[in-house]
Amino acid sequence: MTTIKTTQQYEKAIERIEELLTVVGNDTPYTDKNFVELDLLSELVADYEAIHYPVTAPMLPEIIKPSMQKKGLTQDANLILA
């Protein structure tokens, strides 16, 4: 397989990755067939996800709002910064 083209192929690849993660560890040689397969499938899944599930950078208000809420702060339209 050179690319993942369907949701079914994507789901099968994810299942296989989960299986491989049980047998591949930090001490597994790079030449091990399971390591090679895991590496290849991971790249294919990453490529598929980049197209079908892109991650966009959040806007500044989306970053600041949770922190403000956690600190009990609110937006005050009358606040004037000197």
Image (cartoon, rainbow, N blue to C red):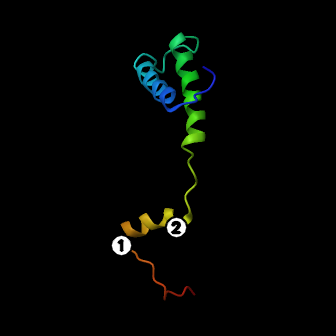
| Disc 1 crowd, CA 10 A, few/some/many (<14, 14-19, 20+) | few
Out of 43 and 66, give the one closest to the viewer.
43
Q: Which SS class for mark 1?
A: loop
> Where's residue 21, x and y in %?
43, 22
Q: Amino acid at mark 1?
A: Gly
| Disc 2 crowd, CA 10 A, few/some/many (<14, 14-19, 20+) | few
Q: Which mark is residue 12?
A: none
Q: Which SS class for mark 2?
A: helix
Out of 58 and 44, give the one closest to the viewer.
44
- Residue located at (42% from left, 69% from top): 68
Q: Which mark is residue 72?
A: 1
In which quarter of the view is residue 32 placed? top right
> Where's residue 5, x and y in %?
58, 30
Out of 62 and 54, give the one closest to the viewer.
54
> Where's residue 15, x and y in %?
43, 24
Out of 68 and 62, give the one closest to the viewer.
62
Above or below: residue 44 compared with residue 64: above
- Residue located at (37% from left, 66% from top): 70
Above or below: residue 77 compared with residue 51: below
Q: Nearer the viewer, mark 1 or mark 2?
A: 2
- Residue located at (45% from left, 19% from top): 20
The span from disc 1 to disc 2 (Cα, nearest Å) is: 16 Å
Q: Which residue is mark 2?
A: 61
Q: Quadrant of the N terminus?
A: top right
Q: Amino acid at mark 2?
A: Pro
> Where's residue 18, x and y in %?
42, 24
